[in-house]
């Protein structure tokens, strides 16, 4: 269920008070819904752990990580998702862009782990004219490399379905 946020609504005012690092002046949540688990309501939240349109990521300081975890613990047991940077293209045939993307994706994954997030959402990538089959194989190898590097990690990776514009992959399941 996707809602348009009415940030003046009493319900969302409560969210701004209870959800870690959601500020009213930054209430650009793409999708939001209430999950019910027994008698307790929980929230589903998606965040960015850094600016989604930049390669650079500020260092997560221990104090920030602990503050986030404390706020999250007081908030409830709903899952928290992070979305990776829009610049990442694990399917790029350009070796330099692929390496930069792989490094950035590993960093995104490590940030999710440090914050104790449940899921990392990613766009699979684009083949940029090199063909879907090779692109999909490269993406699979890259994700496996990240998971192998983080063998005891708990954050799960989710592939976001795309519209299939241009040379993007991930627009169908096969």
Image: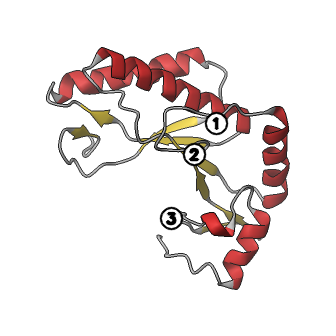
What secondary structure is marked by label 2? strand
Residue at position x 62%, y 78% in the image: 7
State the residue in front, 63 or 12.
63
- Judged left or right of residue 118, residue 40 is right
Q: Is residue 2 visible?
A: yes
Q: If you read the primary sequence from the N terminus, does the residue marked by circle 2 or circle 1 appear first?
A: 2
Quarter-wise, where is residue 151 in the image? top right
State the residue in front, 143 or 51.
51
Q: Which residue is mark 3?
A: 31
Quarter-wise, where is residue 44 in the image? bottom right
Q: Is residue 141 visible?
A: no
Residue at position x 62%, y 57% in the image: 45
Residue at position x 55%, y 32% in the image: 56
Q: Which residue is mark 2?
A: 82
83 above or below 18?
above
Q: Which residue is mark 1?
A: 112
Residue 55 place in picture, x, y as percent: 49, 32
Q: If you read the primary sequence from the N terminus, does the residue marked by circle 3 or circle 2 appear first?
A: 3
151 above or below 75?
above
State the quadrant of the C terminus: top left
């Amino acid at each position: 269920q996707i809602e348009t946020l009415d940030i003046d609504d009493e319900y969302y005012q409560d969210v701004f008070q209870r959800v870690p690092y959601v500020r009213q002046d930054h209430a650009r949540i793409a999708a939001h819904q209430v999950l019910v688990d027994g008698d307790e309501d929980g929230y589903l939240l998606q965040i960015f752990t850094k600016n989604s349109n930049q390669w650079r990521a500020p260092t997560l300081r221990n104090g920030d990580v602990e503050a986030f975890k404390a706020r999250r613990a007081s908030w409830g047991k709903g899952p928290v998702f992070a979305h990776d940077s829009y610049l990442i293209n694990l399917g790029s045939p350009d070796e330099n862009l692929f390496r930069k993307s792989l490094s950035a994706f590993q960093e995104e994954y490590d940030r999710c782990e440090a914050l104790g997030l449940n899921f990392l959402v990613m766009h699979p990538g684009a083949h940029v004219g090199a063909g879907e089959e090779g692109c999909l194989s490269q993406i699979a190898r890259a994700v496996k490399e990240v998971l192998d590097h983080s063998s005891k990690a708990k954050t799960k990776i989710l592939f976001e379905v795309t519209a299939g514009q241009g040379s993007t992959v991930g627009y169908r399941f096969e």
